[in-house]
Amino acid sequence: MERTEIDVDAVKLSFLKGKEAEIVYIHGSGCDATLWEKQLSDVGGYAVDLPNHGESCKAEIRDIDDYAYFVAKAIKKMLGKAIVAGHSLGGAVAQKVYLNHSKVVKGLILVGTGVRLRVLPEVLEGLKKRPEDTARVVSRYAFADEKLAEEFSKVFVERVGILRKDLLLCDKFDLLERFRSGEIVIDVPTLIIVGEKDMLTPVKYSEFLKRHIPNSEMVVIPEAGHMVMLEKPGEFNGAIKEFLKNLVDHLPPELL
Ligand code: COA
């Protein structure tokens, strides 16, 4: 699959490029752009390797806002504006891209994510003390399908350092009260997707998003866990295509 590179403040960001589409996908903790291969080849768009992941360069990242800064600047350079799709930590980044750089966002796709992403303390502690075993446990939590969990555990074991760093950032991400109080209002079309069996970001996190984002729709995918785009690509891509179709039918011309 083709790659394209964008420099943001002298940091090289690498993107995997699929069919032509103005969607930018953001991976979750310890993952990279290859997570979205099945979406890039079918639906299309660009998938970013966040700084310190995959083929992107290193950068100092202190919080989710820092990731959002790099992604937003890259979208501006590359496409002007895009539909921003994010999974888990990537969903937190997508929310921050919208909140901090709303001009580059014409829609959101929030996948297996939430407005607060606290992490089990046992997982954070385990990743420090018994990194490999705990990386395997995280993989088991992340899939409904045990075989896929076993295969994917290699990825988390290999990247356990960045997995832990990302999960520490997730643990600090918290917009719950700002959504509850009505201070945050997302007013772009939003698709929320979650696996029915998601153990890391349970369906109730997506239901909260659905209740608080007026122009949103939610799709719960049966027999899928947290890594829903890998476990059920057919249903997942179908949901995105339906969302895109409705978007084209209803978007005001200035957002197209
Ligand atoms: N959206 C909506 N509500 C949320 C939320 C979210 N993203 N995160 C927490 N809440 C709500 C809970 O539903 C709960 O409400 P309730 O008391 O009405 O049931 C309340 O906030 C407190 O949440 P809870 O999850 O019990 O507390 P916590 O945030 O202090 O819990 C954990 C910490 C780690 C035990 C819990 O978040 C968890 O099990 N997380 C999933 C496992 C994990 O590690 N995920 C990794 C995410 S990347």
Image (cartoon, helix red, strand yellow):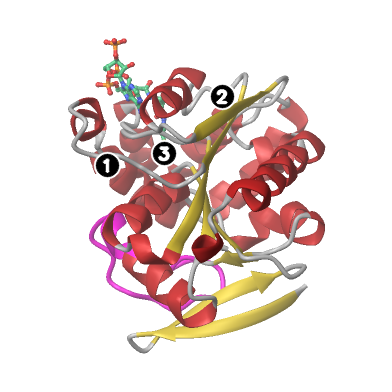
- Looking at this view, is 158 or 243 the one in front? 243
The answer to which image quadrant residue 124 occupies is: top left
Q: How crowded is mark 1: few (under 14 residues within 10 Å), some or many (20 or more)?
A: many
Please name the residue that numbered disc 3 is placed on: 130
Give the side of residue 76 with respect to residue 148, left or right.
left
Q: Is residue 78 magenta?
A: no
Indicate which disc, 3 or 1, sits on the residue closer to the N terminus: 3
Q: Distance between the residues labelled 1 and 2?
A: 19 Å
The residue singled out by tag 2 in the image is 198
Q: Earlier in the sequence, mark 2 or mark 3?
A: 3
Residue segment shown in magenta: 50-68
Asked if disc 1 is less than 8 Å from ligand 1, the answer is no
Corner quadrant of residue 52 = bottom left
> Disc 2 to disc 3, how far (Cα)?
24 Å
Instruction: Give the crowd class for mark 2: few <14, some 14-19, many >=20 residues within 10 Å.
Output: many
- Residue at image mark 1: 173
Secondary structure under badge 2?
Answer: loop
Give the percent coordinates (x, y) of residue 41: 80, 60
Identify whether 81 is placed above or below 201.
Answer: below
